[in-house]
């Protein structure tokens, strides 16, 4: 969303050159509900990448559930 894969690689390489360890946390079943910098409401709807309605929320983790269809 904020750059190309090549730009991400450059960012990681730059961090590594500064002895900074980079951790990329990828969760394949759910994602942040944050719509400012996440995928939630990416196209203005609640169902672009996630199930819509109650099925699309994980109440215990306060996150959105991906729809893989």
Image (cartoon, rainbow, N blue to C red):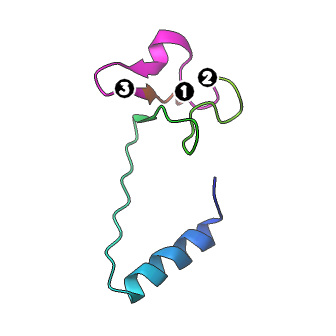
The quadrant of the image that shows the C terminus is top right
Q: Which residues are magenta?
A: 46-63
Tell me where residue 61 sits by quadrant: top left
Residue at 33%, 64% in the rendered image: 23
Q: Residues within 10 Å of mark 3 (few under 14, many from 20)?
A: few
Left or right placement of residue 66 versus residue 21 in this view: right
Where does residue 39 sit, x and y in percent of width and height?
Answer: 57, 39
In this view, 40 is above or below 20: above
Q: Residue furthest front?
A: 36
Q: Are marks 2 and 1 in contact (CB under 8 Å)?
A: yes
Where does residue 62 sit, x and y in percent of width and height?
Answer: 36, 26
Q: Residues within 10 Å of mark 1 (few under 14, many from 20)?
A: many
Going from N to C along the chain, the mark reached first, 3 or 2, is: 2
Would you say the magenta stretch is mainly helix, strand or loop? loop
Q: Residues within 10 Å of mark 2 (few under 14, many from 20)?
A: some
Where does residue 58 sit, x and y in percent of width and height?
Answer: 37, 22
Where does label 1 land, which residue? 50
Where does label 2 land, which residue? 46
Residue at 47%, 10% in the rendered image: 54
Q: What SS does tag 2 mark?
A: loop
Where does label 3 land, which residue? 62
In reply to whether residue 16 is colored magenta, the answer given is no
Q: Residue furthest bottom?
A: 17
């Amino acid at each position: 969303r904020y750059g190309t894969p090549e730009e991400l690689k450059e960012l990681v390489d730059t961090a590594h050159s500064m002895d900074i360890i980079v951790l990329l946390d990828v969760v394949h079943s759910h994602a942040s509900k944050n719509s400012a910098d996440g995928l939630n409401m990416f196209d203005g709807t609640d169902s672009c990448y996630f199930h819509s309605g109650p099925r699309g929320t994980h109440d215990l983790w306060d996150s959105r559930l991906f729809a893989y269809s």
